[in-house]
Amino acid sequence: MVRILVDADACPVKEEVYKVAWRHEVPVAIVSNSFLRVPDHPLIERIVVGSGFDAADDWIADASDTGTIVVTADILLADRCLKAGATVIGSNGKPFTANSIGAAIATRAIMADLRAGGDSVGGPPPFSKADRSRFLSALDEALVRLKRS
């Protein structure tokens, strides 16, 4: 069974996930460390995990499999979910794949080292309309692909 798991605490595309999931009639689990308001709909499930470090990530990784689409911006969580066979899409619509995850992890490590050394490296670019549009397209394509297989 196909389903969507959302790393929801800082996810800017929850509303888009709902729209696409409803159109495809696919269940969604909104996973967070604290209570988040979600639509009252039979396809939407709220999962509130403990406040422990990586509790939401652990829940999502453990629940991931080949029928799962994971929505996250967390590179290390994306890696864990890919290893479980899940399809992983960043909130900006860019997919994480087995071919791209290594470079993403390496870049993350380099940026962390630069920040630890006191360098000002900035953060990701602001979330844009193009990111939102790319996300909608990527999620729709992933659902169609998974439902066919």
Image: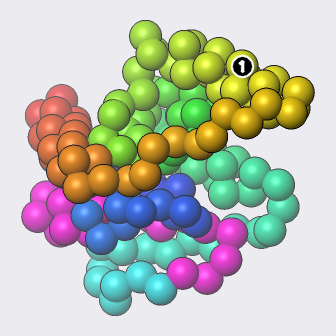
* Image spot of residue 133 (x, y percent): 18, 50
Residue type at the position of mark 1: Ile
Is residue 33 one of those drawn in magenta?
yes
Asked whether the viewer can see residue 63, the reply is yes
Question: Is residue 114 rendered to the left or right of residue 108?
Answer: right
The residue nearer to you, when weighing 124 against 50, is 124
* Image spot of residue 116 (x, y percent): 87, 32
Residue drawn at x 33%, y 34% is 94
Asked where in the image residue 85 lies, by quadrant, the reply is top left
Residue drawn at x 67%, y 33% is 121
Is residue 149 one of those drawn in magenta?
no
Asked whether the viewer can see residue 68, the reply is no
Q: Quadrant of the C terminus?
A: top left
State whether residue 96 is above or below residue 147.
above
Identify the magenta region.
Answer: 17-36
Residue that mark 1 sits on: 110
Question: Is residue 101 rendered to the left or right of residue 109?
Answer: left
Question: Is residue 99 rendered to the left or right of residue 51?
Answer: left
State whether residue 95 is above or below residue 134.
above
Residue drawn at x 28%, y 47% is 131
* Image spot of residue 97 (x, y percent): 41, 21
Asked where in the image residue 29 lies, by quadrant, the reply is bottom left
The residue nearer to you, when weighing 56 against 64, is 56
Coloring applied to the structure: rainbow
Numbered disc total: 1
* Image spot of residue 35 (x, y percent): 61, 82
State whether residue 42 is above or below residue 122.
below
